[in-house]
Amino acid sequence: MHTAVNDPEHGFCRDCLTPQPNAAPRCARCGSPRLVRHPELYRLHLAHIDCDAFYAAVEKRDNPALKDRPVIVGGGKRGVVSTACYIARINGVRSAMPMFKALEACPEAVVIKPDMEKYARVGREVRAMMQDLTPLVEPISIDEAFLDLAGTERLHGMPPAIVLARFEKRLEREIGITASVGLSYCKFLAKVASDFRKPRGFSVIGEAEAHDFLAMQPVTLIWGVGKAFAATLERDGIRTIGQLQKMEQAELMRRYGSMGNRLYHLSRGRDERVVSADRDTKSVSAETTFDQDFGKMDDLVPVLRALSEKVSARLKKAGLAGRTVVLKLKSNDFRIRTRNRQLEDPTRLADRIFSTGLELLRREIDGTKYRLLGIGVSDLCDAGKADPPDLVDTRSHKRALAEGAIDALRDKFGRGAVETGYTFGRGHRGKPARPGEDDEPDVRHPWERI
Ligand code: DCP
Ligand code: MG
């Protein structure tokens, strides 16, 4: 179907979208050096798109005087950086950093308070534009989604790779922000690819190279391998994905349970998850199965606290908030109890999720022993509507500030760095029975289904 000019080894130009007649370093038509070449370029159809420095990009669009200046979006209630533009990042500013540290690193930065409603609106516009490419768009957070473009070549009159490059151009022209695209054969590597050459990136990871590419990468590239689990692997002498590739499936499962299975498949570039459009996140939750059964507040409260923080962190990352708090308990005879309470206003704060969960939990302390505890929020909405300051009393406002500082510390030093009064010294109880089992939400975020 492709003529010689469509040779994937010659690729096409990301600026004028023209397929190239040869392997020259610049576009034969417009002279741009932004060429994409890859042996599997015209075969791959699974993409991950992630907007660059999303909140900051929207602010720069709305105030062109900021274009060449370092911009930090954040502050407000949480007192931390939500995001920073790439100029500020060169100076060391990062998401979730306390604002005072960010300003130490980059004193000349312009700080802008987040306008969540605006970002949610732009996020919806970006999503609508994605849906013009294919009905198979699976949103992951406010500024990113997976897209499956299989079977769309006839519709568009061009292969998925060029459709995606055209999308990047359209996003820049019509919305005024930039994004990075990852193109691959599976979700795992499409996401890895989109992160590869940010901002304005376009990276391709093909099936033939996946194994060798992964071999050189650190284990933290694998979804679900956070700081704590990476430390466990490190203790076992495992640092690279290449080391995992040499291990037997049974051995990995024996050592790491369900997570071992995930490590086995993903390390080999095997990820069968499909892009599913119909599954907007309905709730965000986290749960833990204990090593032994618990029936007392003393034992359950620290776990509830830790899980509330996890749920809150996920909501913040996804730009979401929820109006209903749901508590889940499984008794030692495997009966499930769920209890819920609707809040006045949607929240994304760990403190409010926790205190509501605590009220629900108190009523369930009746001598029953529980093997599982979970907490979550449903009735989700954009974070812009959450925790209105005029309704948040002074005490909880202070707690919200403290919460921002704790988020920042954890981001820097890992989850164990800060323990609240409720979790302090209880790490052994809050911990899951096996890695990877601590955070299986009821209705999972699409990216987390594996
Ligand atoms: N966000 C936040 N707090 C965090 C991380 C992110 O409030 N700890 C918000 C601000 C981001 C948006 O979510 O703009 C999207 O998150 P990303 O992780 O995609 O980060 P960016 O889009 O800002 O940057 P990148 O270019 O790395 O994607
Ligand atoms: Mg982004």
Image: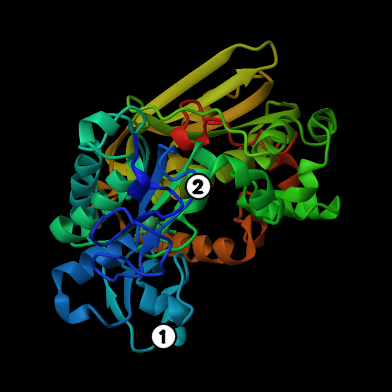
Find residue 424 and name its label: none
Q: Callout 2: few (<14), some (14-19), or many (20+) C-alpha neighbours within 10 Å?
A: some
The quadrant in which residue 168 appears is bottom left
Depth-wise, is mark 2 or mark 1 nearer the camera? 2
Q: Is residue 152 above or below residue 129?
A: above
Residue sitting at 34 percent across and 89 percent down?
Answer: 108
Residue sitting at 15 percent across and 74 percent down?
Answer: 63
Residue with the mark numbered 1: 106
Colouring convention used in this rendered image of the protein: rainbow
Q: Nearer the viewer, residue 126 or 103?
A: 126
**Placement of the C terminus among the 4 image quadrants:** top right
Residue with the mark numbered 2: 39
Q: Nearer the viewer, residue 188 or 80?
A: 188
The three-letter amino acid code for the residue at tag 2 is Pro
Give yes or no for contact between labels 2 and 1 (Cβ–Cβ under 8 Å).
no
Residue sitting at 61 percent across and 42 percent down?
Answer: 208
Q: Does mark 2's beta carbon lie closer than 8 Å to ligand 1?
A: no
Residue sitting at 24 percent across and 51 percent down?
Answer: 166
Q: Is residue 390 at all visible to an observer of this figure?
A: no
**Placement of the N terminus among the 4 image quadrants:** top left
- Direction from residue 284 to residue 208 in the image, left or right: right
Q: Regarding mark 2 in the picture, which secondary structure is present there?
A: loop
Q: Is residue 159 above or below residue 24?
A: above
